[in-house]
Amino acid sequence: MPAISALLRPRPLVLTLCSALLATAVAAPSALADPTDQGRSWKVTGPPGSPTAVVALDPADGHPSLAVRRGDRTVLEPSPVGLVTERADFSKGLTFTGRTDRAVAESYTSTTGKSERRVALMTESRFRFRTASGARVDLLTRVARDGVAYRYVIPRDQGDVLRETSAFTLPAGSDAVIGKYRADNELPFVRYASATEPPAGSYSMQALFNTPGGRALIAESDLNGTYSGAHLTHEAGSSTYKVGLWNDEPVQVEEGSGLTTPWRAVITGDLATVTQSTFIDDLAPPSRVRDTSWIKPGPALWTWLAGGKEAGQSLDAQKKYVDYAAERGWPYEVVDAGWYFKPGEWEVIDPEWQTKNWMPELVKYGAAKGVKIQVWLHYTLLTDPVEREKWLSTLERWGVAGVKIDFMDSESQERMRWYDDVLEATARHHLMVNFHGSTIPKGMQRTWPQVLTFEGVGGEEKRTNTAEHLASLPFTRNVIGSMDFTPGAFHRPYRPNVASDAGELGLTVLYESGIQNLAGTPASYDARPEARRYLEQLPARWERTRLLTGDPGRAAVLARQAPDGRWFIGGTFAGAAQTVDVPVRLGAGRWLVETVTDGPSGLVRTPHAVRDGDDLAVPVVADGGFAAVACRWHPGRTTCES
């Protein structure tokens, strides 16, 4: 086995690019602040067009706060920042001792997501404070064109973190699109007319607000086993959302060690800026995987929603699915739960699974057809280090391409440490990862690029989703990273767009996932030849993403560009049947746009010759949508199929 050091890259320091680039792209660093200057506020500005973060220290009781403004408009009112440890209270009674600024510029590529090539330009300001007893804490802030973030840096010997006092206070007139918090992050998003309206309770750390200063999506980044996951808590009638930690449990800090907490982030701007933002990845540490050539995203045939174990957890059944995937040109087939259990016993692992299992034969069969295999695992199989190594090394030896790991259902510090261990091990064994029953991305996909997607969403398997939920996801959950919604289950009677096959088809583009697990049955695809034809054209990854039009909870239309230059478009709408005007914003010139819409006898494909900047009229049924593909127009061209 290769040495770990040959496969994994140590966490490097943030790289700064040449001074000429920084001078033009990022605001110049400020001089050191006067340590005696108390009871005032300090501004942090980023590249041109950025919001402004305002850090303040109250002269009366020394409590710190942070506000966000864009021009003269408010995105966040002054909001509490701080935390409390076993040995110090860093939420009040603080004295300002200094400030240093620097410019941050990074460029990187991503194996998944809205775009492949990324550039992150930010101003970073470090504010240093101390308590009356001399305990020190730094508030580290970053400002970019599309967001503001902060985190705490605590020197060693301050004990465990008992709680954060971090919060986000929305200005009057803000509305909200948020979802209740649960460990698996799978509850639906709901739109509220006012940020004060949601009932008291806990909400997921992926909440979108429409403020007088622009949209604001609250999230976090760089979460690992040194901390626990966060959520938002809200009191009825309040415009403040506080940060809560897992079960209010203390965060353990190793004796003698310091702590750098995860980023508390606000992605902000107009709706397109928020939707297209990569800010959460930009904040995360660079990739720790040196060679990423084996990490390849792409569509997969996933048959669990065809009937679970009745879908066929046997070699013969899975070979048929491989055949179907090969015919469609899909690079993966996913074998879900049941493959390593004793025949007829779905809770007992076959003791001879390593020697008598049919999986190696399926992998070999798939390889001959150009289809790689991914397999489901219960996370408990990977908790013990010895067992984890046995499972992952065996799968690597068999030639399995990836693992779908399920049922973590916790964001505790202990579970985040488990993620750390599994991320290192799967990278070492060249296994791509899809986490289900999981946390949400929070920057992990930049640091560990073998993670192609997460569930962490109320997806296709749910029976209570709403059209409002479908139209919220592009502006909330999918903003922060890949999302395994598992679209394409045309046969499911429970989907909210059940009357709109075109809307279901559009979700395969509207929702980004490094592994797009297509959840329909072969029969359901064959019964819809236009859908099958469209799905056969889906690319493995996206070069760029653009929001064409949208209104969170009501409508969303996104365009994503494939490596061959074509644009794929997906749209979903909540409400009555209508004809929608979709702006064509794909690039100068003329385009051929093939729409797939719902007709009286099934899906209808219609070509349209349009110029960039035109509006395209598209009919949609109630709670429906559409799919489309666009290519450069030239005389005589009638299809975008490559």
Image (cartoon, grey):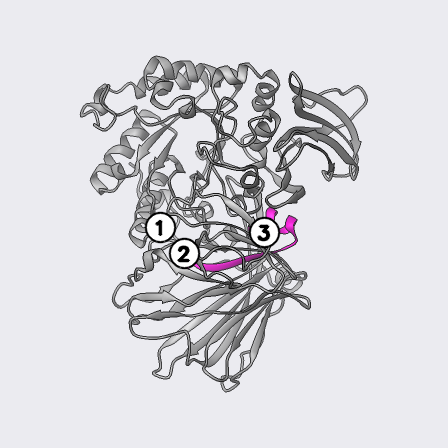
Q: Residue at x 22, y 37 (%)?
A: 387
Three-letter amino acid code of the residue under disc 1: Glu
State the image coordinates of residue 497 (x, y, percent, origin top left).
Answer: 57, 30
Q: Which mark is residue 514?
A: none
Which is nearer the eye, 36 or 310? 310
Query: With respect to residue 12, does 116 lie above or below?
Result: above
192 to the left or right of 430:
right
Does residue 49 appear in this view? yes
Name the residue tied to disc 3. Answer: 119
Q: Quadrant of residue 498?
A: top right
Q: Residues within 10 Å of mark 3 (few under 14, many from 20)?
A: few
Name the residue tied to disc 2. Answer: 230
Query: What's drawn in magenta, residue-wise?
Result: 262-278
User: Is 554 one of the magenta-colored residues?
Assistant: no
Mark 3 or 1: in front is 1
131 to the left or right of 557:
left
State the image coordinates of residue 308 (x, y, percent, origin top left).
Answer: 37, 24
User: Is 275 one of the magenta-colored residues?
Assistant: yes
Three-letter amino acid code of the residue under disc 3: Val
Alpha carbon separation for disc pair 3 and 2: 27 Å
Three-letter amino acid code of the residue under disc 2: Ala
